[in-house]
Amino acid sequence: MSLPAEFHEIAERVNNWGRWGADDETGTLNLITDAVVREAAATVRSGLRVPLALPLGPDGVQSGLVPGRINPVHTMVQINQELFGPGTVATSDDMAVLSLQTATHWDALSHVSHSGRLYNGRPADTITPHEGARFGGIDKVAHVVSRGVLLDVARAHNTDRLPGGHAVTPEDLEAAEELAGVRVRAGDIVLVRTGQMRVLLAGDRNAYAHPSPGLSVRTPEWFRARDVAAVANDTLTFEIFPPEIDDLWLGVHALDLVEMGMLQGQNWNLEELSTVCAQERRYAFLLSATPEPFTGATGAPVAPVAVL
């Protein structure tokens, strides 16, 4: 089954292949220049820090909807072991087994392919069983620090949570932008709040997964026009699920990651940030969100922090 014509039309309009050279593996992160970071640092006023990551534990977001993804399994491998003899300093160590996209994470540009291609036209078969992603892996993302902008779409709709069938449109993003009193600009990292995280925090991970509000297939053009560096939201699927266009599953993923080369993140807890931004009446901040650099991985956990 081929992708619908509408997808290919949008893909042509947002495509960034070759924009930063034929060998580029980081895509729109190139938009985060030194000047952008200096301006981002200037947004800090109070120094208030808001964590945006979910805990990594057995009661996480994974419900079996995505095959192969498990919640973290944590095991102790040393407990107060006196390595150098009785009476010496003792150490405790542990290990974990987890899917790299298990909770709050970034998708690498290699996470999705379509028509046999990854970002920048690289062949999808550059992902191998033993080496993982030889192109566009999460280890190529050396640093993600920029101005973050919260687009609180749920609050702009005067609700705590958008309904499961709500596809977030460019018009929604602009309404949230107006609420925020800020204009998204080149190099920004945009955080889109739908309120869906409230379902997970209430203990229902199945309802959190499906049905879910999320980004519409129309939003990549908006992000491309604004030269956004990366986008994250508070859902499992990132885009609306089930999809708004029949037979176009993960279309937003393909447009963002493959065509634009834009990092995208899921399962970000934006609830506290929503409250703080509303109280302080400002929605732009310094955001630190560098993923763990797993070699050849197609995604990785991240513990983002917004600094106001």
Image: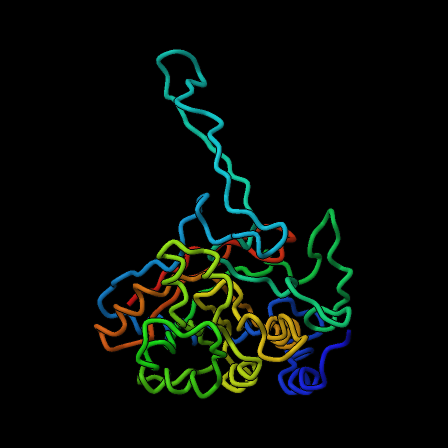
Q: Residue furthest top?
A: 86
Image coordinates of residue 60 in percent, x first then y, are: 45, 50
The correct choice, above or below, for 81 with respect to 71 in the image is above
Residue drawn at the location 74% of the way across and 68% of the way down: 122
Q: How is the image coloured?
A: rainbow
Residue drawn at the location 53% of the way across and 59% of the way down: 142
The correct choice, above or below, for 120 with respect to 206 in the image is below
The image quadrant where one finds the N terminus is bottom right
Circle count: 0
Image coordinates of residue 54 in percent, x first then y, are: 40, 54
Q: State the image quarter where residue 163 is shown.
A: bottom left
Give 143 or 257, whichever is nearer the viewer. 257
Q: Is residue 286 left or right of residue 2?
A: left
Give 231 or 21, whichever is nearer the viewer. 231
Q: State the image quarter where residue 18 is shown.
A: bottom right
Residue drawn at the location 69% of the way across and 52% of the way down: 132
The image quadrant where one finds the C terminus is bottom left
Give 150 or 203, whichever is nearer the viewer. 203
Q: State the image quarter where residue 139 is shown.
A: bottom right
Residue drawn at the location 63% of the way across and 74% of the way down: 251
The correct choice, above or below, for 162 with respect to 296 in the image is below
Q: In this view, does 307 lie to the left or right of 72?
A: left
Image coordinates of residue 57 in percent, x first then y, are: 44, 44
